[in-house]
Image (cartoon, coloured by chain):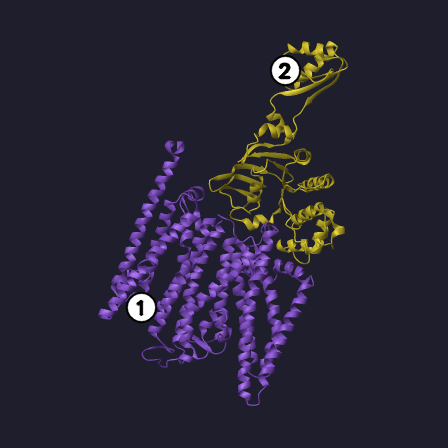
Chain colours: A purple, B yellow
Amino acid sequence: MIAWLAEQRRVYFSNAGVMRDFRSQLRGKRAPLFWSLYLLILTLLILFQYSTLGTGSSRSVAEIQANLYQLFTVFVTLLEVLVCLAAPVMVVAQIVGEYQRRSIELVLSAPVSTKHFLVGKMISGFRYVAILLILALPCAAVTVTMGGATWQEVLEIGLLLTLRSMVFMAIAVPIAVMSKSTVKAVMTSLGLIILYTALSYAVFGALVLSTMSMFGGPEYSPASGLMPFQTSSAIGGSFPIFGFDVPSWVWSILANLLIVKAFLLGGQAAMSRVGAGEIKMLRIGGLLFTGLMSWGLIRLLVPAVTTVTSSPGFGGPSYGGATAVEIQQYVSAAFFVALVPVFCSISYLSSWNMRAEEKHYPDGLFSMRRMLSGHPSGGLPYLVCCWIAAVAGVEFGIFQAGALSTFEIWIRFGYVLGVLVFLYSLGRLSSALTKADISSARKLHFGAIMMVTLLPLPVILIMDASSSYSSGQSSFAWNIYLFSSPFMEDIIVALGQATVLTVLGAAIIYISERIRSRKTLDSTSPIGEQA
Amino acid sequence: MLEVKGLGKDYGGFTAVKTLDFNLEPGEIFGFIGSNGAGKTTTIKMIASLLEPTRGTAVLDGFDVRTQSIEVRRRLGYMPDFFGLYEDIKVWEYLDFFASLYSVSARERPGVIDTVLELTDLSVKKDSFVSELSRGMQQRLCLAKCLVHDPQLLLLDEPASGLDPRARSELKGLIAELGAMGKTVIVSSHILPELADFCTSVGIIEQGELKAMGPVAEISQAIVEEHVIEIRLLESVDELAEFLKEKPHIKGLEKTGPKTLQIEFEGGEAQQAELLKYLIDTGYPVIEFIERTANLEDVFLKVTTGAVQ
């Protein structure tokens, strides 16, 4: 325990890397110039906005205060955008810089953990972000002194933005560790932040909307704590967790810290030695942590949402405003959206070509051992597994909280298994049929996916239209469409479809592997060699 | 102190290092010789716990590089074949950073920094920026960084590459001094004559396989089956050449000059002494009678085939 505490102290409070970066950050003239310019722009912005508030004698004091509060929320969102742009750049520059000058090997030859290194880099990167936030304080103070926001809100926002910046940095950490170019790493990180934002809005948007004041709920939602650029909605009020009234900012900090930890585990796993015991532990730990974190957050969140208000919504049982059916529809759509990255990665997981496979993956493309040993070919499968663990955690949490029925949860798991196996099998078939290059194999795979997803649509839509016209019901043809399972109401049909997809996929994989092994044998036989 | 047991590394279907076994004792300076791609750097990185071995392991002072890498790292100093320096900080700050990484207490650090700077002859550059140092100085700074925690094992990968003759000579002296201090040093290099000067033992690696290992003299004797003896006379060696043709232990002879003769001799030292006595007794005016020993370069060329993986 004492050794663990000493290690934590070494990592968080006396990190050698932080001191080294601090020394170089203190030097140079560009930083003070940049900060001065930043402060000047902020001040001018506030002065301009403020001058527009007082004009017009018809405005009451209350109206001006409301405008000031609006100014405060706009200001906070702008600040978060700035933090979102600055945080990944800072941490990526710090980490990729170490790889580019190859000093990383010197650092890792010292008795320090990957966590020590990455936390040090995050703290160093955060130093810049902290200056951004501190310099913005005087401007935020205007809205307090003139009315509108309170000091408590300013402090809570500051704290939450700090955590948000950590999340943005943590998202960039695994990318930076795997990248050799700063620009590419920054662009990828920003792309990932946008994806994270979009998905968090898709998944948690339903829960936020269901509790917002427009639906009869309170002004704030605990789910906002998980959604970037919703910082002003994530403070204020409190929520019952295990019977305790927890301030929403405390909940937001906890949730963001857990997300930081998940990405940091990913960064550590990406950085560890290939094949080392620690990487296996980190990867298994990362998978478990991601799944448990998602489950835990949702498990805490959903009851909090449902008990915020017991007032009936727009008819029927209410979840703080929106009906249970509405929430289920939202969550179903969100679940589908959340799986899009997994579907998009299928080609990269399954489809290469014969030559590339023989050269780089002689014993097959996917193996659990490769994934956990840190082998480069196991990187993407690991990320996909993490993603699936997160989605599964969310779904299971929603199910346990009572927002999903057993039927719906089975539909989802069956659907994921069936569609993934089927799409993976198409990739394996494309790979086995292609000898030329990777892009040909992937084009073939993409074409196959398009065929099974887009081609049936016109036929189904026509059948659906005629069915609606004649009987007023949706066509049965939807039941055989690939992406319809999560929306089906008939469990037998839905599970039947999942089973058919899984069996069909398994058969295609078997045939593909037979083709693959026969081609490999042909090329190694004397006749093949002569040819 | 360092036991390398069946250490090997594969990259997919490619074997970078087959199976290495050797032991090193304190104070030993081990020269690791091999052409580019032979597996030197991979081996050094595996011992430094920067690469995970595919098979086997290395044990430093009882700590296994595979399972106790942090403990191993505390006991070794690693200097790669590139500098990897932070150029925007000062020399003492650079050393302070590494001392901190190696958990040298803040109280002890100034003293340690002064000591290693003195040892590497960089005291006058203490407050200079790293970017202002010459290549030789940067190399010494990198070595100084390896010494801040007083390691038992030093892993120096191509430390003399790119250095001018003076800087090389200084580095050579420094490594010899470290060996004298009781540290075990593994140094890889292409510059073979320099290694022979200060290495107590060498290992020749080719295609990931250790072809020969031991003190230079022992390897030379083991590798070179025949002894080559050079004889110089005051007069022409024509008559001597004819005379020696029929003598025992003489496998071949070659005139290398009007008064010099080189013979391939199969006998041992006793037979050599006998031959010399016989020549003198017979009345040949012998000025020199020298056994030409194989140098490290000869041994290297003899042992290796020049094949690359």
Q: Chain of mark 1?
A: A
Residue at (56, 37) in percent of width and height: B38
Look at label 1 and name its amino acid. Answer: Ser
Percent from the top left, x then y, of residue B227? 64, 21
Q: Which residue is mark 1?
A: A405
Contact, mark 1 vs mark 2 (Cβ under 8 Å): no
Q: As rendered, which of B80 and A15 lies closer to the eye?
A: B80
Percent from the top left, x then y, of residue A441? 40, 48
A451 is higher (above) or lower (below) than A254: above
Look at label 2 and name its amino acid. Answer: Gly
Using residue A394 as the reference point, say whether residue A87 is left or right of it. right
Percent from the top left, x then y, of residue A225? 48, 71
Q: How many marks?
A: 2
C-alpha gap between disc 1 and disc 2:
96 Å
A84 is higher (above) or lower (below) than B141: below
Q: Dot 1: within a 10 Å radius of its alpha carbon, few (fewer than 14), some, or many (20 or more) residues?
A: some
Q: Which residue is mark 2?
A: B252
Q: As rendered, which of A258 and A158 lies closer to the eye?
A: A158
Q: Can residue A380 be seen at all in this image of the molecule?
A: yes
Using residue A113 as the reference point, say whether residue A434 is left or right of it. left
Percent from the top left, x then y, of residue A506? 31, 50
A212 is higher (above) or lower (below) than A452: below
Q: As rendered, which of A193 and B41 lies closer to the eye?
A: A193
Helix, strand or loop at label 2? It is strand
